[in-house]
Image: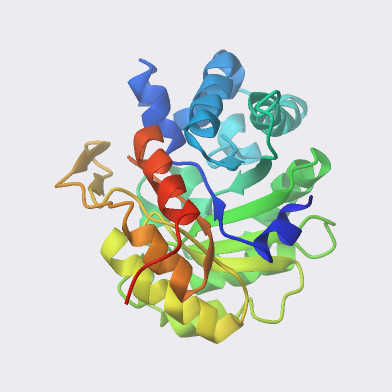
Amino acid sequence: MKLTEALTRRPVVLDGGLSNQLEAAGHDLSDALWSARLLADEPAAIEAAHRAYYEAGAEVAITASYQATYEGFARHGIDAARTRELLALSVELARRAGAGLGREVWVAASAGPYGAMLADGSEYRGRYGLSVDALERFHRPRLETLAEAGPDILALETVPDADEARALLRAVRGLGVPAWLSYSVAGTHTRAGQPLAEAFALAADVDEVVAVGVNCCDPGDAGAAVELAARVTGKPVVVYPNSGETWDADARAWRGPARFAAGQAARWRAAGARLVGGCCRVGPAAIAEVAGELAGPGPKG
Protein backbone atom coordinates (compact mmCIF):
# COMPACT_ATOMS: atom_id res chain seq x y z
CA MET A 1 0.00 0.00 0.00
CA LYS A 2 1.24 3.48 -0.79
CA LEU A 3 1.67 5.86 2.12
CA THR A 4 -0.75 8.30 0.54
CA GLU A 5 -3.41 5.58 0.51
CA ALA A 6 -2.72 4.68 4.14
CA LEU A 7 -3.31 8.32 5.11
CA THR A 8 -6.86 8.11 3.80
CA ARG A 9 -7.57 5.19 6.12
CA ARG A 10 -5.90 5.94 9.44
CA PRO A 11 -3.21 7.95 11.22
CA VAL A 12 0.38 6.84 10.60
CA VAL A 13 3.15 6.89 13.22
CA LEU A 14 6.34 8.77 12.43
CA ASP A 15 9.66 8.17 14.14
CA GLY A 16 11.38 10.49 16.62
CA GLY A 17 14.65 12.38 16.73
CA LEU A 18 17.37 10.57 14.83
CA SER A 19 20.20 12.60 16.36
CA ASN A 20 19.26 11.89 19.96
CA GLN A 21 19.05 8.17 19.25
CA LEU A 22 22.51 8.27 17.67
CA GLU A 23 23.88 10.26 20.62
CA ALA A 24 22.32 7.77 23.05
CA ALA A 25 24.30 5.07 21.23
CA GLY A 26 27.51 7.03 21.91
CA HIS A 27 28.06 8.89 18.65
CA ASP A 28 29.53 12.41 18.63
CA LEU A 29 27.42 14.72 16.46
CA SER A 30 29.10 17.98 17.40
CA ASP A 31 30.40 18.91 13.95
CA ALA A 32 28.55 20.96 11.33
CA LEU A 33 27.31 17.90 9.41
CA TRP A 34 25.48 16.57 12.48
CA SER A 35 24.00 13.11 11.87
CA ALA A 36 24.74 13.34 8.14
CA ARG A 37 28.42 12.76 8.94
CA LEU A 38 27.62 9.17 9.87
CA LEU A 39 26.33 8.48 6.37
CA ALA A 40 29.97 8.49 5.34
CA ASP A 41 31.64 7.39 8.56
CA GLU A 42 29.32 4.84 10.17
CA PRO A 43 26.17 4.08 8.16
CA ALA A 44 25.38 1.01 10.25
CA ALA A 45 24.72 3.33 13.20
CA ILE A 46 22.04 5.15 11.23
CA GLU A 47 20.41 1.90 10.19
CA ALA A 48 20.36 0.78 13.82
CA ALA A 49 18.75 4.05 14.92
CA HIS A 50 16.02 3.69 12.30
CA ARG A 51 15.46 0.11 13.40
CA ALA A 52 15.03 1.19 17.02
CA TYR A 53 12.17 3.47 16.01
CA TYR A 54 10.55 0.85 13.80
CA GLU A 55 10.70 -1.61 16.66
CA ALA A 56 9.09 0.99 18.92
CA GLY A 57 6.10 1.18 16.57
CA ALA A 58 7.08 3.86 14.05
CA GLU A 59 5.77 3.24 10.55
CA VAL A 60 7.77 5.98 8.80
CA ALA A 61 11.51 6.51 9.08
CA ILE A 62 12.80 9.98 8.24
CA THR A 63 16.21 9.71 6.60
CA ALA A 64 19.53 11.12 7.83
CA SER A 65 19.66 13.60 4.94
CA TYR A 66 18.30 16.62 6.82
CA GLN A 67 21.73 18.26 6.91
CA ALA A 68 23.13 16.45 3.87
CA THR A 69 23.59 18.91 1.01
CA TYR A 70 25.93 19.27 -1.93
CA GLU A 71 27.25 22.54 -0.51
CA GLY A 72 27.63 21.29 3.04
CA PHE A 73 29.47 18.12 2.04
CA ALA A 74 31.70 20.12 -0.33
CA ARG A 75 32.89 22.18 2.64
CA HIS A 76 34.11 18.94 4.15
CA GLY A 77 35.92 17.77 1.02
CA ILE A 78 33.18 15.47 -0.28
CA ASP A 79 32.60 15.86 -4.00
CA ALA A 80 29.30 15.86 -5.86
CA ALA A 81 29.51 12.24 -6.97
CA ARG A 82 30.06 11.03 -3.42
CA THR A 83 27.31 13.32 -2.17
CA ARG A 84 24.88 11.69 -4.59
CA GLU A 85 25.90 8.30 -3.22
CA LEU A 86 25.42 9.41 0.38
CA LEU A 87 22.00 10.93 -0.27
CA ALA A 88 20.89 7.72 -1.97
CA LEU A 89 22.39 5.73 0.90
CA SER A 90 20.26 7.65 3.40
CA VAL A 91 17.14 6.26 1.73
CA GLU A 92 18.62 2.78 1.41
CA LEU A 93 19.51 2.64 5.13
CA ALA A 94 16.00 3.58 6.19
CA ARG A 95 14.55 1.03 3.79
CA ARG A 96 16.91 -1.68 4.97
CA ALA A 97 16.12 -0.98 8.62
CA GLY A 98 12.46 -1.75 8.01
CA ALA A 99 13.07 -5.05 6.25
CA GLY A 100 11.80 -8.20 7.92
CA LEU A 101 9.46 -6.49 10.38
CA GLY A 102 6.42 -8.33 9.11
CA ARG A 103 4.42 -5.14 8.63
CA GLU A 104 4.32 -2.30 6.18
CA VAL A 105 6.62 0.67 6.76
CA TRP A 106 7.61 3.67 4.67
CA VAL A 107 10.59 5.98 4.12
CA ALA A 108 10.48 9.79 4.14
CA ALA A 109 13.54 11.44 2.58
CA SER A 110 14.40 14.48 4.66
CA ALA A 111 15.25 17.84 3.12
CA GLY A 112 16.02 20.42 5.75
CA PRO A 113 16.09 24.18 5.23
CA TYR A 114 18.98 26.20 3.86
CA GLY A 115 19.89 27.23 7.40
CA ALA A 116 20.59 23.62 8.38
CA MET A 117 23.51 23.62 5.95
CA LEU A 118 24.86 26.79 7.58
CA ALA A 119 24.82 25.07 11.00
CA ASP A 120 24.54 28.40 12.80
CA GLY A 121 21.00 28.25 14.14
CA SER A 122 19.51 30.22 11.25
CA GLU A 123 17.27 27.25 10.45
CA TYR A 124 15.22 28.49 13.42
CA ARG A 125 15.08 32.06 12.13
CA GLY A 126 14.87 32.03 8.33
CA ARG A 127 15.37 35.32 6.52
CA TYR A 128 18.72 34.32 5.01
CA GLY A 129 18.91 37.25 2.59
CA LEU A 130 18.46 34.94 -0.41
CA SER A 131 15.78 35.23 -3.07
CA VAL A 132 13.17 32.57 -3.67
CA ASP A 133 14.91 31.75 -6.96
CA ALA A 134 18.26 31.28 -5.19
CA LEU A 135 16.68 29.01 -2.58
CA GLU A 136 15.02 26.95 -5.30
CA ARG A 137 18.40 26.50 -7.02
CA PHE A 138 19.85 25.33 -3.69
CA HIS A 139 17.12 22.79 -2.96
CA ARG A 140 16.35 21.32 -6.38
CA PRO A 141 19.52 19.21 -6.97
CA ARG A 142 19.29 17.50 -3.59
CA LEU A 143 15.56 16.84 -4.02
CA GLU A 144 16.19 15.37 -7.47
CA THR A 145 18.81 13.02 -6.03
CA LEU A 146 16.60 11.98 -3.13
CA ALA A 147 13.62 11.41 -5.43
CA GLU A 148 15.73 9.19 -7.69
CA ALA A 149 16.59 7.05 -4.63
CA GLY A 150 12.95 5.96 -4.40
CA PRO A 151 11.56 7.13 -1.06
CA ASP A 152 7.84 6.93 -0.40
CA ILE A 153 7.65 10.65 0.33
CA LEU A 154 9.86 13.72 0.58
CA ALA A 155 9.88 15.46 3.97
CA LEU A 156 10.33 19.19 3.41
CA GLU A 157 10.84 19.81 7.08
CA THR A 158 11.68 22.39 9.73
CA VAL A 159 10.99 25.19 7.25
CA PRO A 160 11.25 28.49 9.14
CA ASP A 161 10.20 30.90 6.43
CA ALA A 162 7.33 31.17 3.96
CA ASP A 163 9.74 32.38 1.26
CA GLU A 164 11.73 29.18 1.62
CA ALA A 165 8.48 27.23 1.44
CA ARG A 166 7.75 28.91 -1.87
CA ALA A 167 11.14 27.78 -3.15
CA LEU A 168 10.63 24.21 -1.94
CA LEU A 169 7.17 24.02 -3.48
CA ARG A 170 8.66 25.01 -6.82
CA ALA A 171 11.54 22.58 -6.38
CA VAL A 172 9.35 19.49 -5.85
CA ARG A 173 7.30 20.00 -8.98
CA GLY A 174 7.64 17.19 -11.50
CA LEU A 175 9.79 14.92 -9.33
CA GLY A 176 7.21 12.15 -9.27
CA VAL A 177 7.36 11.70 -5.49
CA PRO A 178 4.77 13.11 -3.06
CA ALA A 179 5.93 15.46 -0.32
CA TRP A 180 4.91 16.90 2.99
CA LEU A 181 5.66 20.49 3.96
CA SER A 182 6.36 21.06 7.63
CA TYR A 183 7.11 24.41 9.24
CA SER A 184 9.01 25.19 12.41
CA VAL A 185 6.81 27.66 14.24
CA ALA A 186 6.46 29.94 17.24
CA GLY A 187 2.83 30.20 18.23
CA THR A 188 0.72 30.95 15.15
CA HIS A 189 3.62 32.32 13.09
CA THR A 190 6.55 30.85 11.23
CA ARG A 191 9.92 31.27 12.88
CA ALA A 192 10.50 34.16 10.47
CA GLY A 193 7.36 35.84 11.77
CA GLN A 194 4.87 35.28 8.95
CA PRO A 195 1.26 34.34 9.83
CA LEU A 196 1.02 30.58 9.78
CA ALA A 197 -2.33 30.60 7.98
CA GLU A 198 -0.70 32.38 5.03
CA ALA A 199 2.26 29.99 5.10
CA PHE A 200 0.03 26.91 5.06
CA ALA A 201 -2.08 28.36 2.25
CA LEU A 202 0.94 28.28 -0.09
CA ALA A 203 0.65 24.48 -0.26
CA ALA A 204 -3.11 24.20 -0.53
CA ASP A 205 -3.18 23.86 -4.32
CA VAL A 206 0.15 22.09 -4.84
CA ASP A 207 -0.64 18.57 -6.00
CA GLU A 208 2.74 17.17 -5.01
CA VAL A 209 2.14 18.10 -1.36
CA VAL A 210 -0.02 15.49 0.34
CA ALA A 211 0.33 16.73 3.93
CA VAL A 212 1.08 20.04 5.62
CA GLY A 213 1.96 20.79 9.21
CA VAL A 214 4.65 21.50 11.78
CA ASN A 215 7.71 19.92 13.32
CA CYS A 216 10.59 20.78 15.65
CA CYS A 217 8.36 23.19 17.54
CA ASP A 218 7.20 23.36 21.12
CA PRO A 219 4.54 20.70 21.76
CA GLY A 220 2.34 23.42 23.17
CA ASP A 221 2.21 25.12 19.76
CA ALA A 222 1.32 21.97 17.86
CA GLY A 223 -2.40 21.66 18.59
CA ALA A 224 -3.45 25.05 17.24
CA ALA A 225 -1.16 24.57 14.23
CA VAL A 226 -2.76 21.22 13.39
CA GLU A 227 -6.24 22.73 13.45
CA LEU A 228 -5.09 25.66 11.32
CA ALA A 229 -3.31 23.49 8.74
CA ALA A 230 -6.36 21.28 8.33
CA ARG A 231 -8.71 24.22 7.99
CA VAL A 232 -6.57 26.24 5.57
CA THR A 233 -5.41 23.45 3.25
CA GLY A 234 -7.96 20.66 3.53
CA LYS A 235 -5.02 18.24 3.40
CA PRO A 236 -3.90 15.61 5.93
CA VAL A 237 -1.76 17.18 8.64
CA VAL A 238 1.74 16.16 9.69
CA VAL A 239 2.86 16.96 13.24
CA TYR A 240 6.04 15.99 15.06
CA PRO A 241 7.14 18.51 17.68
CA ASN A 242 10.34 18.31 19.65
CA SER A 243 10.58 17.62 23.35
CA GLY A 244 9.91 21.22 24.30
CA GLU A 245 13.52 21.93 25.14
CA THR A 246 15.23 24.87 23.39
CA TRP A 247 18.27 24.54 21.12
CA ASP A 248 21.22 26.76 22.09
CA ALA A 249 23.07 27.14 18.78
CA ASP A 250 26.16 28.71 20.37
CA ALA A 251 26.60 25.94 22.93
CA ARG A 252 25.18 23.29 20.55
CA ALA A 253 23.09 21.99 23.44
CA TRP A 254 19.45 21.69 24.49
CA ARG A 255 18.15 23.78 27.38
CA GLY A 256 15.04 23.77 29.57
CA PRO A 257 12.47 21.12 30.53
CA ALA A 258 10.92 18.47 28.28
CA ARG A 259 7.18 18.88 27.71
CA PHE A 260 6.35 16.30 25.03
CA ALA A 261 3.45 14.08 26.11
CA ALA A 262 2.21 11.18 23.99
CA GLY A 263 -1.31 11.82 25.26
CA GLN A 264 -1.46 14.84 22.95
CA ALA A 265 -1.35 12.55 19.90
CA ALA A 266 -5.01 11.54 20.11
CA ARG A 267 -6.06 15.20 20.24
CA TRP A 268 -3.88 16.00 17.22
CA ARG A 269 -5.52 13.10 15.39
CA ALA A 270 -8.97 14.45 16.21
CA ALA A 271 -7.93 17.84 14.79
CA GLY A 272 -6.84 16.36 11.47
CA ALA A 273 -3.35 14.94 11.99
CA ARG A 274 -2.56 11.83 9.95
CA LEU A 275 1.23 11.70 10.32
CA VAL A 276 2.19 11.93 13.99
CA GLY A 277 5.52 11.51 15.74
CA GLY A 278 8.29 13.43 17.43
CA CYS A 279 11.35 15.43 16.49
CA CYS A 280 14.46 16.38 18.46
CA ARG A 281 14.85 14.71 21.84
CA VAL A 282 11.80 12.50 21.38
CA GLY A 283 13.07 8.94 21.57
CA PRO A 284 11.79 5.40 20.90
CA ALA A 285 10.03 5.09 24.25
CA ALA A 286 7.94 8.17 23.53
CA ILE A 287 7.17 6.97 20.00
CA ALA A 288 5.96 3.67 21.42
CA GLU A 289 3.54 5.65 23.58
CA VAL A 290 2.41 7.70 20.57
CA ALA A 291 1.74 4.48 18.67
CA GLY A 292 -0.35 3.24 21.57
CA GLU A 293 -2.35 6.48 21.68
CA LEU A 294 -3.07 6.41 17.95
CA ALA A 295 -4.17 2.78 18.13
CA GLY A 296 -6.82 3.74 20.67
CA PRO A 297 -10.34 5.10 20.10
CA GLY A 298 -9.33 8.76 20.38
CA PRO A 299 -9.97 11.42 23.01
CA LYS A 300 -13.15 11.40 25.05
CA GLY A 301 -15.50 14.30 25.42
Quarter of the figure with residue 23: top left
Q: Percent position (x, y) of residue 237?
A: 54, 68
At horizontal 59% and vertical 81% (from top left) the residue drawn is 233
**Residue 5 seen anywhere in this rendered image of the structure:** yes
Is 17 placed left or right of 170 in the picture? left
At horizontal 27% and vertical 65% (from top left) the residue drawn is 220
For this rendering, which residue is in front, 285 or 145?
285
Quarter of the figure with residue 124: bottom left
Quarter of the figure with residue 21: top left
Q: Percent position (x, y) of residue 263?
A: 31, 56
For this rendering, which residue is in front, 152 or 155?
152
Task: Using the image, determine if residue 63 lies above or below residue 141.
Answer: above
Task: Using the image, determine if residue 73 lies above or below residue 5.
Answer: above
Task: Give the position of the C terminus as an image quadrant.
Answer: bottom left
Q: Percent position (x, y) of residue 46?
A: 54, 23
Q: Percent position (x, y) of residue 17?
A: 42, 39
Q: Residue furthest left?
A: 256
